Amino acid sequence: MNLDQIGLWAGVVFTLMIFSYLLGDNFLYRLAVYIFAGVAAGFVFIVALQNAILPWLRLTILAPNLGIGERAFGVTPIILGALLLLKISPRFGRLGNLALAFIIGVGTAVAVVGAVSGTLIPLADATADTITEDTLSSVIVLIGVIATLVYFMYVARRIPGQLATTGRRGLLVQVISVVGKGFIVVTLSALYAGALLSSLTIFSERVAALIARITGG
Amino acid sequence: MRRLLAILASVITIGVGLVTIYDLTVGTGELAAALLRLVVATLALMIVAGVINLLIVHIGRMRYLKRGWVYSLVLLVSAFATVGFWLAGQSEMNDLLLNSVQVPVESALAGLLFFALVYGAYRLLHRRFTWTGLLFIIILLVMLVGALPLEQFGLARQVREWLLSVPVSAGARGILFGIALATIVTGVRVLIGQDRSYRE
């Protein structure tokens, strides 16, 4: 039995161990999950080291003929990482907030620009394009988009004599949000059906692979 | 000192955020790319630290023979074996681990999801009757029946196509618009110093 055959049989055993969960939580299932977690942790470690940390070190700190500025730039992630590790210390934990602030600053800026240029503008363009195609469908799409957005609108009128935290939505907003709720239900239901079909396909593929391996097909 | 650090954290977030936005929208994008590279390298270091922490936790569980130490042993052996093969330059062993452990376990877990989803739909039917629950089940059935490659269900297939291209498309766009708007609002709140949860 060569290495490939061992691998194929190991795959069969692991699949059966995971499927044993259908009979309830058991030792074999947990064993497979822990082996999976260990291997996954190992691969994550390798990928982070091989694809991010080592190239970074080679390009900055370990690179020949670089100025002090470039080397300082190369050391920065190590300083930021060390600051983040300080967050586990009750005494110096607040120093870790500086590194966190840097990461949040860059992340927020990228997220805002990405949301505008990657989602908002292309989606608005795509929705505007549908309006010119088919009248009835385009009207439904337009109503659906607006009603879905209105459903998530949490602006309410304050009720006189009541706490500032309680309020009531206007009648028009209530009606539109009911329509929006319907569109959201239809969307989530379709996504649910998609997830069901995908998982059924994967399940049947696994069962077919098991049968083929066991029967030698 | 505590107050100074809090102010410094706000200054860093707002300063770095505004510089990045400026460079991404008006500037050349080089500075933003450099800042992003810094963040990626820092996060990679943190991922490595996280994996090391996971191993330390399981070594502790094994050392004191806590409940489930056998699982910890298995996890440690598999993690060290994966890294060990990589360090020894035996890439074919890593490929074997990937194809015989990662892929089968991941796909088997995804296959198990089918049972969880069916059970979820069954539980929904047992909850109290609402128009949204009824609509959900009807659409779910239409979508499933419409996906069957049978001649008899041609109408269901047409309805499914229409549902996907019109109401589902509208709902998905509405949800995506909502996510984008919420991202922008939250981002702007952070960048103008209104949201300072990172200082806690």
Image: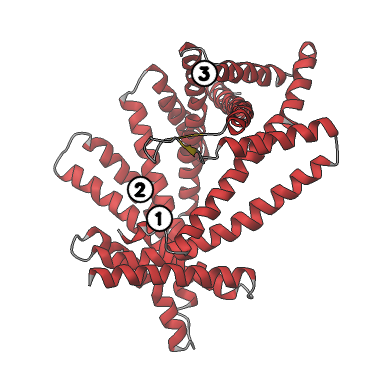
Q: Is residue A97 above or below residue A175?
A: below
Q: How many marks?
A: 3
Q: CA distance from mark 3 to mark 2?
A: 37 Å
Please state the chain letter of the residue tagged with numbered disc 2 in the rendered image: B
Specify the amino acid type for callout 3: Ala
Label pair 2/1, CB-CB below 8 angstroms:
yes
Q: Is residue B185 above or below residue B123?
A: below
List x then y, in percent, for residue B189.
Answer: 47, 58
The residue tagged 1 is: A45
* Residue A80 located left or right of residue A178: left
* Residue A65 located left or right of residue A131: left
Q: Which mark is residue B113?
A: none
Q: Which numbered disc, 2 or 1, marks the residue closer to the eye?
A: 1
List x then y, in percent, for residue B176.
Answer: 61, 43
Specify the amino acid type for callout 1: Phe
Along the line of sight, the residue nearer the viewer: B163 or A51: B163
Along the line of sight, the residue nearer the viewer: B154 or B29: B29
Q: Is residue B181 above or below residue A33?
A: below
Identify the residue at the far front of this view: A161
Report the residue at 17% width, 38% height from top. Answer: B66
* Residue A165 located left or right of residue A178: left
Q: Quadrant of the C terminus of chain A?
A: top right
Secondary-structure class at tag 2? helix
* Residue B61 located left or right of residue A65: left
The residue tagged 3 is: B121
Q: Is residue B125 above or below residue B74?
A: above
Residue B89 appears in the picture as rendered: no
The residue tagged 2 is: B79
